């Protein structure tokens, strides 16, 4: 009967430590799992040193194995599908945060339609674009040239008229 209790305590400890990875319990599951493992190992060593060492070897092998297998298999279980986020989906061209057409504006010239201190609006190549002035403030209706595009940020400098 004590062998069954020992095996049950060790199995419960291993299960609770595995669940700590997936269920936020603020450490309660890991404390309970560790206590079960320690209690099971103490009972195993009470039966004899050979039994205790065997139980310890089993725990040392099974704990990392179950964690690796659990992390690999958990997302495909019914509970895992509800908890774990799905993989990253490919975004279409319309869903990207960066507008690639802005890179075509580099080197083009236009004029500001509002004061850039440092951000504002300019009309470049016939379209209104949000821009950022490099350096100092640029007044409205001043000629500008696009220096570079950094993501969605179009950097301009005032051009001499």
Image (cartoon, rainbow, N blue to C red):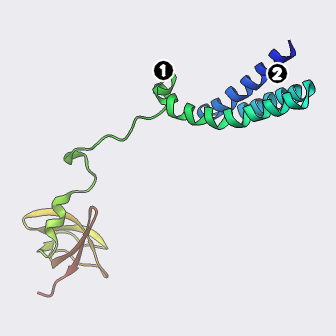
Where is residue 119? Give x, y as percent: 29, 69
Residue 9 image offset from top left, x and y in percent: 78, 22
On screen, residue 64 above or below 13:
below
Q: Residue furthest front?
A: 50
Looking at the rendered image, the quarter that the N terminus falls into is top right
Q: Quadrant of residue 89?
A: top left
Does 155 sit left or right of 27 as displayed? left
- Give 104 or 136, whichever is nearer the viewer: 104
> What is the quadrant of residue 28 in the picture?
top right
First reached walking from the N terminus: tag 2 or tag 1? 2
Q: Residue at x 52, y 29 (%)?
A: 74
Q: Which residue is mark 1?
A: 78
For label 2, the residue is 6
SS at mark 1 in the image: helix
In the rendered structure, the answer to whether residue 16 lies left or right of residue 68 reads: right
The answer to whether marks 2 and 1 mark residues whose Cβ atoms lie closer than 8 Å is: no
Residue 154 on image: x %, y % = 24, 68
Q: Residue furthest left?
A: 126
Residue shown at the point (83%, 17%) measured from the top left:
3
Q: Where is residue 56 shown, x and y percent of the image?
A: 79, 34
Instruction: Report which quarter residue 44 is drawn in.
Output: top right
In the image: residue 14, left or right of residue 102: right
- In the figure, 106 relative to 5: above or below? below
């Amino acid at each position: 009967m004590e062998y069954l209790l020992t095996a049950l305590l060790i199995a419960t400890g291993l299960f609770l430590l595995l669940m700590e990875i997936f269920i936020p319990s603020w450490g309660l599951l890991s404390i309970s799992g560790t206590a079960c493992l320690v209690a099971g190992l103490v009972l195993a060593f009470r039966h004899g040193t050979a039994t205790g060492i065997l139980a310890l070897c089993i725990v040392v092998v099974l704990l990392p194995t179950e964690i690796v297998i659990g992390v690999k298999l958990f997302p495909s279980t019914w509970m895992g599908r509800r908890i774990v986020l799905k993989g990253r989906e490919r975004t279409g061209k319309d869903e990207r945060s960066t507008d690639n057409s802005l890179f075509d504006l580099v080197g083009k010239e236009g004029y500001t339609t509002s004061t850039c201190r440092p951000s504002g609006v300019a009309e470049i190549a016939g379209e209104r674009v949000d821009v950022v002035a490099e350096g100092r403030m640029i007044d409205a209706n001043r000629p500008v040239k696009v220096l570079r595009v950094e993501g969605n940020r179009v950097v301009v400098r005032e051009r001499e008229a």
